[in-house]
Image (tube, grey):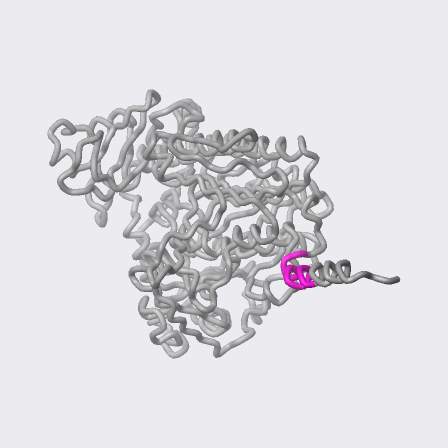
Amino acid sequence: MKTNGIEMKHQIVLLLLLTVLSPFYNGVNAQNKPNILWVLTDDQRFDSIRAFNKMTTGKEMSELGYVESPNVDRLAEMGTTFINTYCQSPACAPSRTAMHLGRYPFRSGIFEFEYYNNKAAHFQPTLPEQMEQLGYQTLHIGKLGVRIRTLKNGKAVKHQIYQTDIDFKKLAEEGFTDWGKMWAKEVEGEKLDTPIKNLEFFVTEDGKFEYVSKELEESRPQYKGSGAAAMKKYDLLRQYNEKKGPQTPFSPGILAGVSSRKSGNTRDGFYAQIFEAYLNNLEGDYTIGSQSFDKIDESKPLFCHIGFDFPHTPVLPPKEYIERFEKYDYQIPQFDESEFEKMPKQLKQQVKQAYTDHFTDAEKLKMIQYYYAFCAYGDQLIGQSVDAFIDYSEKRNQEWMIVYVCGDHGWKLNDHGSVSKFSPWEVDVHNPIIVVSSDKKKFPNGKVVKNFTEFVDVAPTILASGGADLEDASFNYLDGLDLAKVAAEEAPKRDYVIGESHAVTGPRAFIRTKEYMFSLKVRPNKKRGENMEWARNASDKELDMCLYSVKDDPKEVNNLAYDKKYQSITKVMKKKLIDIVLGDNRVEVQWGKKADGTKVFRSNFAEGAHDYRLKLKGNL
């Protein structure tokens, strides 16, 4: 067949385009790509979900008591639950970064709350940036927790990774919340002599701001007593201990209190409202307060990420939820000094920082009741958001997928004598995922996958569903697995999960199998690039190890790491963990205080150690 010159040129151009774009596409037509909603909560224990409790213990209720989760339970019925999913870091920022990058902390060089930039040699585009290249319109609402910057003329500047980013900070400052904090240079139009770094405030139903700040009360007589008034009005229980000092109206961390607003008009309530309104806003730009955002481009599939704040502190459920949950009694986790003495030094440090066992029984009960009430309220908002998303997709005859991640990590409620997270204990790192899809072949209704899965699986799962060819070399940097392949048993089966965090405890890594959890001090300090192989030659005492037999000791109380009977287990798990996190393509970066550093340090003495396999001979 003859082809004229113009046609030939068009064919050449088309061929070139296909060649350039081939790494990103896997034969999925743009019009057939599913809309994708990724829902992430904050500090949520998996036992707050009835469906998860039934999968793990056979009972709907938490071991502590009553919980309520009809909407997430519905998602479990509609889709596939990956019940043995574990986070990569029990701290907000590194955990969220691991999901957005699809990389372990030891491969990204992001271990805690540091700011970083995307210009280091090893850095790859984030999940939403990859989705944009796949033809998606990307949207984020609420908390993000990804502290990324880019470099402009050598200086670190803000880097927006979602095309539309409706951030919680601006919403809070304009009153679309029940509680917030801000850096304040003025209050109610009156300039302050000295800016207040963390001005806490409540917003009433009629939009009035009520401020809580010791500095404000000391500098402005008209605000004298406002903190104490808020403490009483909202029935606040704040964190207090030897480290944090006595409880005052200005103590950090609200562990229990009543919201200043009605259900639906809280911080998280506004996220759900805004998401629903944005999906229904098709005529012009979407406006909320002083902010305006481009409307949805209906020619493109949607990738939406909602970062709910619940049940992170401040724990402020609406009044009607508190009234319901105050009717229930709860089993308060017990703790004694003998458990504390068995802990590694690094974990003792975390417990001391967030110690709560000195609370009265009434205070402990209150923080548990309010926590689960907050989770139940959040469940309602998840249902509202999910229904709006499915409705948007089905009205347009479009495929869709929902990824629900139960917390960026867990939360203690006097477990091990403290609140907070930051530990490798089960309660802090076990966070199941549910994937629901209009494609029931990939993610069948009601299926429960018990194989180990990890937070690094989120990015490859979403990318693959969006049309990316993960077999292409350009995606070799991803550490995770496509959950569709895990569900179909077409992916490697993990014998273990791993993680690392440097926040609060200092540098510590963990490895968990179905039988044991082992963790150790992985670095002598936080100096990036220095003495990276320290743990290879450190003594067992210096490594501050812990080993728990999770089948015999599910609460992880008895440290067996230095028990002669368990030395063979300890030795194998220690070597495996050190080889993986320190020796299999480890990356550390000197990001610098201004996030403008790009100097990369690597350690690769055990390349290939992370092979998903760990056979423990002589299991006891």
Marks counted in the figure total 0
Note whether 588 is above or below 446 in the view shown: below
Which residue does the image show at 26% across and 36% down from the upper left?
200
The location of residue 47, given as percent across then percent down, is 50, 41
Which residue does the image show at 67% across and 30% down from the upper left?
395
The location of residue 546, given as percent across then percent down, is 41, 63
| Front-most of residues 589 and 618 | 589
- Residue 399 appears left or right of 577: right
Which image quarter holds the C terminus? bottom right
Q: Is residue 23 magenta?
A: yes
Which image quarter holds the N terminus? bottom right
| Front-most of residues 438 and 535 | 438
Is residue 519 in view?
no
Which residue does the image show at 39% across and 36% down from the upper left?
368
The stretch of residues the image draws in magenta is 16-25
Q: Is residue 611 magenta?
A: no
| Res. 24 image quadrant | bottom right
Query: Looking at this rendering, what residue extends furthest in the right direction?
Result: 1
- Residue 4 appears left or right of 591: right
Q: Main secondary structure of the magenta part?
A: helix
Note whether 294 is above or below 353 in the view shown: above
| Front-most of residues 497 and 384 | 384
| Front-most of residues 320 and 55 | 320
